[in-house]
Image: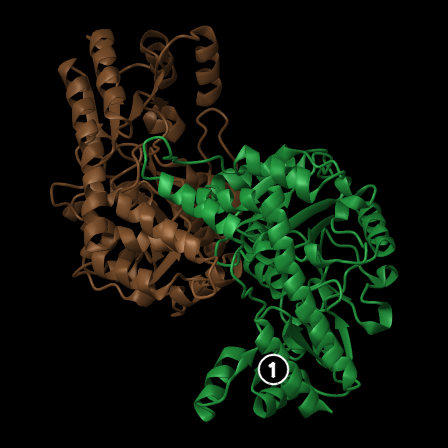
Chain colours: A green, B brown
Amino acid sequence: MIWTREIEHKNKYPNANVISLGIGDTTEPLPDVVALSMANYARKLSTPKGYRGYGAEQGCKALRKAIAETVYKDIGIKDSEVFVSDGAQGDICRLQLLFGSNMSVAVQDPTFPAYVDSSVIIGQTGDVNRESGSYQKIEYMACGPHNSFFPDLSKTGRTDIIFFCSPNNPTGHAASFEQLEQLVQFAQENGSIIVYDSAYAVYIKDGRPRSIYEVPGARKVAIEVSSFSKIAGFTGVRLGWTVVPEELLYSNGFPVIKDYNRVVCTCFNGASRISQAGGLACLSSEGFKAVLSLVDYYKENAEILLETFKSVGLRAYGGENAPYLWVHFPGSNSWDVFNEILEKTHIITVPGSGFGPAGKEFIRVTAFGHRENILEASKRLRSFLS
Amino acid sequence: MIWTREIEHKNKYPNANVISLGIGDTTEPLPDVVALSMANYARKLSTPKGYRGYGAEQGCKALRKAIAETVYKDIGIKDSEVFVSDGAQGDICRLQLLFGSNMSVAVQDPTFPAYVDSSVIIGQTGDVNRESGSYQKIEYMACGPHNSFFPDLSKTGRTDIIFFCSPNNPTGHAASFEQLEQLVQFAQENGSIIVYDSAYAVYIKDGRPRSIYEVPGARKVAIEVSSFSKIAGFTGVRLGWTVVPEELLYSNGFPVIKDYNRVVCTCFNGASRISQAGGLACLSSEGFKAVLSLVDYYKENAEILLETFKSVGLRAYGGENAPYLWVHFPGSNSWDVFNEILEKTHIITVPGSGFGPAGKEFIRVTAFGHRENILEASKRLRSFLS
């Protein structure tokens, strides 16, 4: 476990300035306009006029509308297709409740662990192979430098559900329009539902799709899960959303949105109204500018780190359209690399093997962090790796 | 559906002052100290010192400790056994994820619908009987005036899980110590897990147990789900908790708490930190006094309503240790009663049959509401029913 290693290390070097480039957690303060809107909302809850009780389970109308109009501008998502939530992780589990245990599942390899872990909990995975750590009934879609981080779909088995994260956690790869076209076509041919995780979409800078719905036909095959966590630093505030298009149908013709609405109304009682007020402020014109400048800050961090690894001759992927870097140490074991970096530089990373078998020669490095820590980490890494 | 009837009614009588005693939603402003603590916490999120990202999935330590020490004073619940959440409804579904589809389930009849609805979603219930609306594989434990609102356990079939809500929604009955002793013994004998919903425990005024853990042996058989919603008016703020005692084991000896911790860490990313700051303020000595006086306000509402029904010769149950009244209209159909009351008094209630077959002669009336509305409703009901 990373955190037990972290504690051991801090005990061994009590005076070391340990820098974490491990867990992807936001570090910079919220924009004033966003914090103020939440503070004002909370304050008014003690007044007869400002008090509010239960809200709609699907989120307040104004926020659903703002998400549809701001995040999905010109893409044609309806307010009623946006389900506001307390974050993507909860939404993934609510989707698993929707799917149930008899669905077959594909994930990218490497992958964000929550898709697999939630599949295990709902009972979709079958037995685990003790050696590789992979599950019998999960289709692992290898993604690496050899295939431009996009699976060879001609060799991918048909599944009911395809979890697909872009920009990817952990590899930082943002899928191209052509790649997503292939994915949508593959889902159409197989009658599969894509669960598209776009939590890092705002980090895309080179024009690649920020939403699966930019691809024609996606409304018939894809659910999109996203979050304010990495857009606006809401990791502690908790706010996200899921889009379920009306055209997405089960094979018997029943609309998935009706079923999802039922799961949401049964298993969830709405995101905190205070967090929703913050989300609305994020999507106001002043707020949106402010959160995008926060995102720019982390993007610059990513550039500094990318340059660092390149300068010492390592291949680092991601970092351009994502707040994560996926650094290749050919022929090595990711836990050894993790341990050596920690021991020699007091920097915490994440061993790639934690994201799946394909991660064994990689480490993940996050670009979330205070600038001075990123610069100091860069200095130490240059010195150690060169 | 109640809300379609409500809309129809308002269209028919556009000038009527419709009073809702239907959905149990809090109406009174939060105490100043609570709203201020949330406002201050939110405001500080825009400062370098005050910003916080992800918190522990299980909730912040201070709040877990405050819940253990304030709500479970002298009952010996450990901080580490308290899992803070965004509310009881989400916790019930996380528990269903823990249990999975192969568990058998018992519910009180009438019952809060979320237990059954979540059982349907996870796949525990089998087919529905179209006529009665009951599910083949669910054990319905009839609770009514004939058995002091406590099931005849000698006639109750063994199930893996027993959902039990006290003070009960909808009947307003708070189980006595002796009744809970019987329930715990029954669970022990059958190797069942009780999921005890104590969301309304703070409304108990006559010394009955406010927690299942007041009963010896309960730590080995019971999980307790609770919430700040009805304690502090947090229905829109979203904050709750679940207690899983260390001594609760599966039949193979594995601790349930370890499994629940895994579900929480996979399917949930912690309650909003702002809501948690509010919860902490509720449990401070000043805050706790203030929220209890809110609870007193609703208790007085309940007394007014209870007196109203009694004065016209109707039998109304609950209302003494709970914010709900369960009013008996012998020989009638609850939807007819609901419709007649709405038509003649412009008051919305809830037909009892929505809570299960045993509710067919009852309506549920909530005591949440502004005092002037409660008094006006009382006047109209006295005049209509006498």
Tell me: residue B304, above or below residue B68. Answer: above
Q: How many marks?
A: 1
Q: Residue at x 62, y 84 (%)?
A: A338
Whole-percent x, y for residue A125 in the image:
63, 62
In this view, the residue in front, A129 or B212, is B212
Residue B29 located left or right of residue B74: right
**What's under tag 1, amino acid-wise?**
Glu
Q: Residue furthest left?
A: B206
Residue A155 located left or right of residue A91: right
Whether residue B240 is visible to the viewer of this picture, yes or no, is: no
- Quarter holding the C terminus of chain B is top left
In this view, the residue in front, A263 or B151, is A263
Q: Residue at x 46, y 61 (%)?
A: B47
Whole-percent x, y for residue B357 in the image:
37, 28
Whole-percent x, y for residue A288 in the image:
62, 48
Task: Check disc 1: other Cα within 10 Å, few if <14, some if 14-19, many if 20+.
Answer: some
Q: Which residue is mark 1?
A: A376
Task: Give the SS element for disc 1.
Answer: helix
Residue A307 located left or right of residue B92: right
Whole-percent x, y for residue B26 in the image:
32, 34
Give the letter of the chain under mark 1.
Answer: A
Whether residue B15 is visible to the viewer of this picture, yes or no, is: yes
In this view, the residue in front, B241 or A105, is B241
Q: Residue at x 79, y 45 (%)?
A: A214
Q: Residue at x 88, y 60 (%)?
A: A154
Asked where in the image residue A64 lies, by quadrant, the reply is: top right
Tell me: residue A169, above or below residue B131. Answer: below
